[in-house]
Image: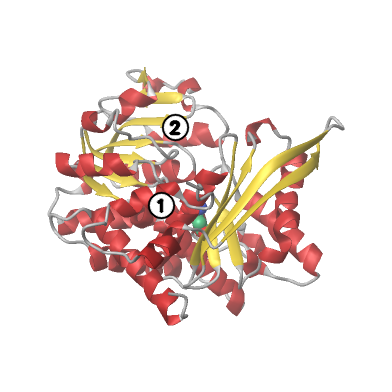
Amino acid sequence: MKRDKTICSHAEEYLKLIEGELPLSPEEKFCLTHPARVYIFTIPIRMDSGEMRRFNAYRVQYNDALGPTKGGIRFHPDIDLEEVSTLAFLMGLKTSLSDLPFGGAKGGVEVEPKTLSKGELERLSRGFVRGLYPNLGPQKDIPAPDVYTTPQIMAWMRDEFERISGASAPAVITGKPLALGGSRGRDVATAKGGIYILEHLCSLRREKWLQEMTVVVQGFGNAGLNAAEILSEKGCKIIAVSDSSGGLFQKEGLPIHVLVEAKKSGTALTDISHGSLRDAKKISNEALLELPCDVLVLAALGGQITMQNASHIEARIILELANAPIIAEADTLLFNKGVFVIPDILANAGGVIVSYFEWAQNLEGISWDEKEVFSKLQKQTTAVADSIYLEGKNLRTCAYIKAIRRILEAEKLRGRL
Ligand code: GLU
């Protein structure tokens, strides 16, 4: 049989989760498992050494029924088309779930950014925009930061787009620095939104106070670091954290402000030495995931909880701040085990919600203060959680059903289904 090369096989897997609850016609299923547009290109860069190198780059505009496509660009050595496509599918569900006027997209460059100089990183970022220029724009496709991409990279990308077009277009990209049209609060939005949702769902479930909870945080990048900081300010006991260098465990709680300060100045977690870490033990990433705790925050990469380790998870609640950290099959196992999972498309939507605020502010030429951004974010995230939470139900399934219904309705209204 001829192989369908454009199908997103992970989207197929995820759709199996809702099979019994939302029957899909073959046309609807085809629409949801196939991206609208896929771009594969290479970015040639002059390295500082004088050598020329080419990097593989991808952009998948998965579904645009609800509006221009929206989603981050990640720089990572392991990225490939399949992963970008899966993340673009999830991005489409995320924007739909949060009632945003956007479709879903994702981009990626196969590169180890830690090995690039600042100049090489700038040339690579500008190269991404040059390679994709005709297909980007405030009403076409609007990128944003993702794993290992920063506000500075967004600034270069905006600048490159405007150099080519010859006109100002701040809304072409979000997650920019404040001075270049970024939104207040965007840097902490993913973590902040996740914690609004965690608090709200805990109160709906009549859980104990957040202050009385023990927390483990996997990943200490933008989302994980800010989540650890906010949760520790709220009084939670953060017993373990990790980054790509490994994990730290301290039963009585880790001094998060010390770790944040050291990490911000470029020290890997496992290299930090400080008096308040006397009782801290180094712990592997695998062991960290299996620690007994109230809340496990997954804020690293995808595919962390699989059929191999799902049955060993001892957390009561999981907050998915990363995209796709739990594989589809393992999600069912966790649900049957009684773990309450707050799924990525809900838990980390704060990032794209504030991206939407940024885009809207740019189009109107206005700027909101931080208080306004956070109060709008809190209102929107808690309303979305309310719209899908049903006691005793798998929250991921509920989130998928709402998101997919909205996409399919838009497809039908456009006459494409
Ligand atoms: N990369 C983030 C995500 O996966 C943000 C996307 C955006 O703001 O467009 O949700």
Residue bearing mark 1: 11
Name the secondary structure under disc 1: helix
Residue 259: image tag: 2
State which tag comes first along the sequence, 2 or 1. Answer: 1
Q: Few, some or many C-alpha atoms within 10 Å of disc 1 (few <14, some 14-19, many ≥20)?
A: many
In this rendering, position of residue 297 left or right of residue 220: left
Quarter where residue 197 is shown: bottom left
Ligand 1 neighbours mark 1 (CB distance < 8 Å): no
In this rendering, position of residue 340 left or right of residue 276: left
Q: In this view, does 17 lie above or below 137?
A: above
Q: Is residue 415 above or below residue 195?
A: below
Amino acid type of disc 2?
Leu
Q: In this view, does 366 lie above or below 214?
A: below
Q: Where is residue 149 in the image (x, y as percent from the top left)?
A: 59, 46
Most extreme residue toward the right is 50
Q: Residue at x 60, y 65 (%)?
A: 141
Q: In this view, does 181 lie above or below 110?
A: below
